[in-house]
Image: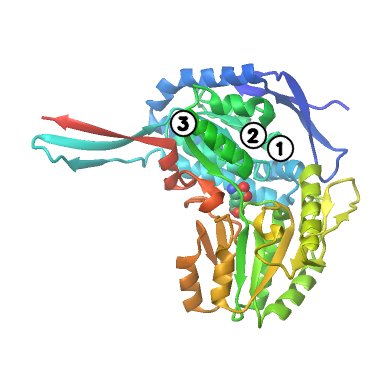
Amino acid sequence: MTTQKHDNLINGQWVAGASYAPNINPSNLADVIGDYAQADAAQLDAAVQAAQAAFPAWSTGNVQARADALDKIGTEILARREELGTLLAREEGKTKPEGIGEATRAGNIFKFFAGECLRLSGEIVPSVRSGVSVEITREPVGVVGLITPWNFPIAIPAWKIAPALAYGNCVVLKPADLVPGCAWALAEIISRSGIPAGVFNLVMGRGSVIGDPLVNHPGISAISFTGSQGVGGRIAQQCALNLKKVQLEMGGKNPQVILDDADLAQAVELSVQSAFFSTGQRCTASSRLIVTDAIYPRFLQAMQQRMASLKVGDALAAGTDIGPVSSLSQLEQDLDYVAIGQAEGAVLVAGGQRLQGSTEGFYMAPALLSDTSSAMRINREEVFGPVASIIRVKGYEEALAEANNTPFGLSAGIATSSLKYATHFKRHSQAGMVMVNLPTAGVDYHVPFGGRKGSSYGAREQGRYAQEFFTTVKTVYVGN
Ligand code: UN1
């Protein structure tokens, strides 16, 4: 079988990789999507140099041209959302409707930042000295390195690339090795958008080969990373040593509180959606369901019933609720954590096994563990799969304490009909995003995204707040 070769984009040219790696469909391991270039450190260096050379003209260039290019990219993504969403489902394993939803989000992000090109503003303030005025402006940071994860193969590249370009930076994108297909498709769209050669560069390959050279390259001014806490911590150290700006979005162990006065059907639906849809592979997934005493038996039973009706299968098949896990190593990690939870004393009340599909793939029945406590590893470490645990509590105060009893702090949800508890939770949850009667996962694209504690480091992503990271402030004093 011959597969199409996909090259890196460096200085406006498609450049063959030092080697190629196959991109394999996790729903059907016999389906090879294509071969994708694997860059070496020399190619990475060429990409950074191209971006450096493009920076002076791009960063001071016409903002209408910038806005037009981003708008064109967004328009094409939206027009091709079905095709791109299908590619996404095929390479990552989320369902086709989820893939199309993500492609739509990516298109909308480019449209939003097309508008932001024209809205960047500063301040003019009086000086404390007579005859002097002060201007505060924002300027691009330089060449930014963007390192994106495998679980959102088009939305996360979009939400880093679009603000980077809108605010006048040049980009070197290193997408996750596991899912280069959507990043390549996005790069191909960008390459025809009118953006000058070298402003945007795609360098595919393994983190172990080009990750360190990217982070440590003297031509890179800032790194924006989404991925694991372990890798994020190392990147932060390297950036600190090199005095680079850094933004990290890492894991979550997000609580979903369910109070006695919650609407049961709604609580079950939002728990299933956050814990298991997208195969639980979201940093915003609800992995800890914190349930108060009186509703607990009804909630548990309704969850088991709802989970029994979930259809796990081929991501591209109509009617699939939950696609496969994205890789074998992730599937092994998910199954390991189910066993770790049970060894710690948790009771497996639904799913938790590998499933056979009609094709060979990484299928797993979503797992629910009951009788867990916050001290257990299953409640302290991010699993990143379709695995959730229940923590039973007496009432709201204990629920809030358990929700905050975690090294992470990305998203937190509460299901309640009480204005009093909802209001208290909004203020006292130690998370960057709080959801009232909504799933912890699935966020808007035009408002800040990010967390506290071990979940995030540096400035927020998304919306207008993205300018904190992708610009640097200049204070100008003008004498008369
Ligand atoms: C969402 O829940 O809509 O990697 C987005 C992640 C997050 C994105 C979640 N950065 O899962």
Q: Residue, x 36% and y 32% (percent of image)?
A: 139
Local SS, label 3: loop
Q: Is residue 251 above or below residue 341?
A: above
What is the x, y in percent for residue 324? 79, 50
Q: Residue, x 82% and y 63% (percent of image)?
A: 351
Dot 2 and dot 1 residues touching (CB under 8 Å): yes
How far is disc 2 from disc 1 in space, using C-alphas? 7 Å
Label 1 belongs to which residue?
179
What is the x, y in percent for residue 307? 78, 67
Dot 3 and dot 1 residues touching (CB under 8 Å): no
Compared across the picture, whether 462 is left or right of 480 comes to right
Quarter of the image with the C terminus is top left
Q: Is residue 57 above or below residue 249?
A: above
* Residue 319 at least partly seen: no
Quarter of the image with the N terminus is top right
Label 2 belongs to which residue?
175
- Which of the 4 quarters of the picture holds residue 226? top right
Q: Is mark 1 within 8 Å of ligand 1?
A: no
Residue 360 image label: none
Name which residue type carries label 1: Val
How far is disc 3 from disc 2 in space, using C-alphas? 20 Å
Name which residue type carries label 3: Lys
Residue 244 image label: 3
Mark toward the start of the polypeptide (3 vs 2) = 2
